[in-house]
Amino acid sequence: MGTAEALVFLCWTILSQNCQADTYNNVKTQFVLLYDAYGIYKDAYVDTIPRSNAISPRDVELRFSLNSFAEFDAVAGALELMGSLSMNWTDEVATLQPVTFDPTIKEEILVDYRKLWTPVIVLVNSADSVKRIGDENYKVRFNTNTGAVTWAPRVIIRAACTPDVTFFPFDKQTCVLTFTPWFTDSTQIRLTIRHDTWDTEEYSGNGVWKLDTTSAATRLSGNNYYADFTITFVRQPIYFTINIVLPVLLLSLLTGFVFLLPSASGERVGFAITCFLSFVVLLQTMMKFLPEASAPMSLFCYYVIIMMLFSGFVSIVTIFLLRIYHNPDPSGVWRWLVHAIELITCVKCKRLKRSGFKCNCKRNTVEDVSASTSDSEIQIIKHEKVNGELNHNMPLRASFNARRISDVATQLKAADEKKPPIKETPIKETSKISEISEEEEENTITWEDVSKILDFFFFLAFLGAQAAFSIFFLVPLGTRA
């Protein structure tokens, strides 16, 4: 009984070894047949496209799979991605050579890309060295039954891309990866697209950029086919908003408050210059994230430059205001400066009203009408009356005007009877009194008063200008958020 079991075990071992040897040998035979078809052991012709019809181009289907978004360097204008470029085509070498694969052994085999024909696909707009997609690390999957070939090498792509930072830090970038079969015209290879979008199932995301849309298309330019893979991504602005935008806004608002500091404190010039230098530092920090290009420039960059110029202007104005505040001139405030202060504080308007100046838009009073009514017109009214009534033979408009003037004259006569006699003041004495009062008002304005009034005026002017520029430059940015 023990001898029989030993014989059975020995037979099973021998048979299993023979089956494994036959399976390995059969698979090896498939490789040998493929290599013989390409003449690997004789004269190799792997650079020749295996196609039965030499006039018809070989179709190569492409699809890009995105794995990770490495970075987008806006300064250098380069996009770095990690993914794989899948290439599919049909190999007709088995029908061109006296080779017959065994369909019962193994349907697909993995082959070195140098052992059969593979298309030489390159990235046209590469920002690094230009080389073919794929190497010996990635095998080609060959179907022995259908001749279908699939090759999906992983790639680290660094492509040139022109950035658009008009709305930085709320900008959206669009880059295109352009592939073409190198040194192969449209009569030999025709590129096609499997899907009109990228494969993003294994995409891991990015902390700075958010993937928006992807697209893919082919085009024929000249005598060559090109495959354009377009990607659109949006910047996530929270980091830049907190670290750049908010400090600039607060610093812009803080600059105007230099006019509210007391002139006697001695800190106004230092405060203004510190704000100016802070703008310079923020501008240099922001330039690290922007390309060195004149067009297009960021709207926010224009805003920072204008606010920096405003800060420099505030520093200069502050120095002049301190000069006015500490002016030791004993002769008093200059006359032209007094007039300017009166215009700012509306003293001129009040004085003009007090002197009897009336605007044309006011309704005329009885006295105004009387001044415009001459004695000759009143005489005309008298002649136009017949037996105490107006002459009805007059035209309608003339009759209306005569009735109106007659009523006014009656009112004037009644008002003159009620008015008490007024003592007239000579014109020379009146003008002299007004000149003395004006000189007294001018003498009451001191240099300190002038400095305080100008401080408040420039404070309001700066806030108004800052609000205008902020609306003009920052509202378009806010709509993109």
Image (tube, grey):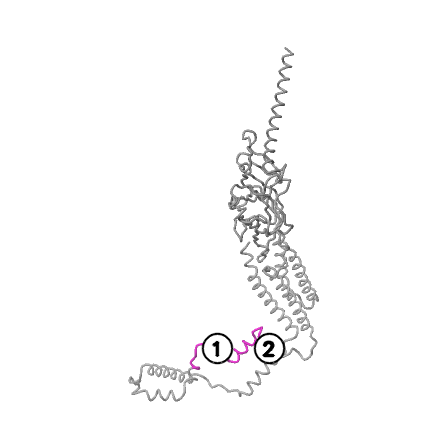
**Where is residue 385, by image quadrant?**
bottom left
Q: Residues within 10 Å of mark 2 (few under 14, many from 20)?
A: some
Q: Mark 1: which secondary structure?
A: loop
Task: Please state the horizontal and vertical placement of residue 411, each as a whole percent of the image.
Answer: 39, 82
User: Identity of the amino acid at label 2?
Assistant: His
Q: Nearer the viewer, residue 173 or 224?
A: 224
Looking at the rendered image, the quarter that the N terminus falls into is top right
Q: Position of residue 237 (x, y in %)?
A: 59, 52
- The label shown at residue 151 is none
Circle 2 sits in a helix, a strand or a loop, which is it? helix
Q: In the visual, does 54 lie left or right of 115?
A: left
* Mark 2 to mark 1 CA distance (whole Å): 22 Å
Residue 420 colored magenta?
A: no
Q: Amino acid at mark 1?
A: Cys
Q: Where is mark 1, residue-wise?
A: 359
Residue 159: % across, % down:
61, 51
Q: Quadrant of residue 140?
A: top right
Which range of residues does the magenta coloring cover?
340-368
Give yes or no for contact between labels 2 and 1 (Cβ–Cβ under 8 Å). no
Residue at coordinates 57% horizontally, 36% vertically from top-left? 142
Q: Which residue bears the numbered disc 2?
A: 339
Q: Which residue is at 63% across, 15% downward? A: 7
On the image, the x and y values in percent for residue 215 come to 53, 48
Tell me which residue sits at (56%, 87%) in the image.
429
- For residue 457, above or below residue 191: below
Is 83 located above or below residue 451 in the figure? above
Position of residue 467 relative to residue 449, above or below, is above
Q: Between residues 278 and 81, which one lies in front from this camera angle? A: 81
